[in-house]
Amino acid sequence: MHGLEDALDEARAIAAGVDAQAPAARVALCPPATLIGRLAHALAGSGVEVGGQDCHREPQGAFTGEISAEMLVDAGATMVILGHSERRGYFGETSPDVAAKVAAALRAGLEPIVCVGETTDERGSGRALEVVLGQVRESLPDELAGKAFTVAYEPIWAIGTGVTPTTGQIEQIHGAIRQALRQRWGATTAPILYGGSVKPDNAAEILRLAEVGGALVGGASLTAAQFLPIVRAL
């Protein structure tokens, strides 16, 4: 829940930097729903895609305050983040809820970015792998077979805390997610992003780890000065 009209200038600066750098990786910004249409217009023709932060499972209906996947597409989005830890934690979304939203995104033609991750207590009790793999299993519906999608691992205990997991911890989880995806869909090339206190000074180290296919960036994505160095690290 960051971003008003003046945030468009920052987004334009990010797009200009991305176009100048021409990174091999895809770059996207996922603003609040109020800015999606204006951001899509402002970034048209640039190398930056636009996505949503969430969507409802239904295409339309009496769901005051919600936004459907079809509405995101109509506003100019090409992808959507689903199952973010804040949606799971603050709004009680379960993995089956997330799976229904993923199916909705596919129905509308959006590429889903599906988030998974463990809490501090779950990590401390040695259940990190169990929790994350359970979320992977239950949040990814069968409809994803043959479709473009992304998984994002976000250790909840590292988000906004300045604490970053060790490289070994990241590789362990990402490797387990990749194995789970292969067991279910074969040789899938779905990227696995890392998200959790990604900053300019640690991005390069994280992004070169095995099975880390990109970054889901939070606070550091709000300004070109913080975000573009991360893009360069790709």
Image: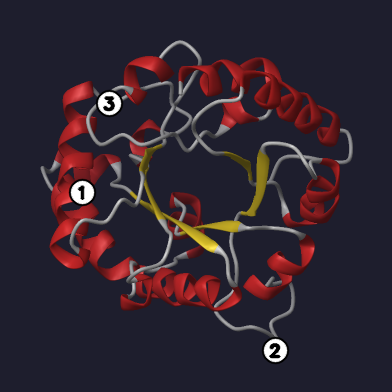
Q: Residue at x 50, y 15 (%)?
A: 200
Q: Place residue 208 in its image quadrant.
A: top left
Residue furthest out toward the right: 5
Q: Residue shown at 58%/70% (left/top)?
A: 109
- Residue 13 position in % (x across, y down): 78, 24
84 or 209, which lies in front? Answer: 209
Which numbered disc flags the more N-terminal residue, 2 or 1?
2
The residue lying toward the viewer, choosing from 181 and 93, is: 181
Residue type at tag 1 = Arg
Placement of 138 over or under 156, stated as above or below: below
**Which label lies toward us, 2 or 1?**
1
Task: State the image coordinates of residue 103 (x, y, percent, origin top left).
Answer: 46, 76
- 28 left or right of 97 in image: right
Q: CA distance from mark 1 to mark 3?
A: 18 Å
Q: Which residue is mark 2?
A: 61
Q: Which element is circle 2 on?
A: loop
Which kind of residue does numbered mark 2 sit on?
A: Gly
The mark found on residue 105 in the picture is none
Q: Is residue 220 above or below residue 121?
A: above
Q: Position of residue 44 (x, y in %)?
A: 80, 45
Q: Is residue 17 above or below residue 61?
A: above
Closest to the camera, between mark 1 and mark 3, is: 1
Task: Name which of mark 2 and mark 3 comes first in the sequence.
Answer: 2
Label 2, label 3: how far apart the Cα atoms are = 42 Å
Secondary structure type for disc 1? helix
Classify 77 as above or below 59. above
Count of marks, rendered view:
3
Q: Which residue is mark 1?
A: 178
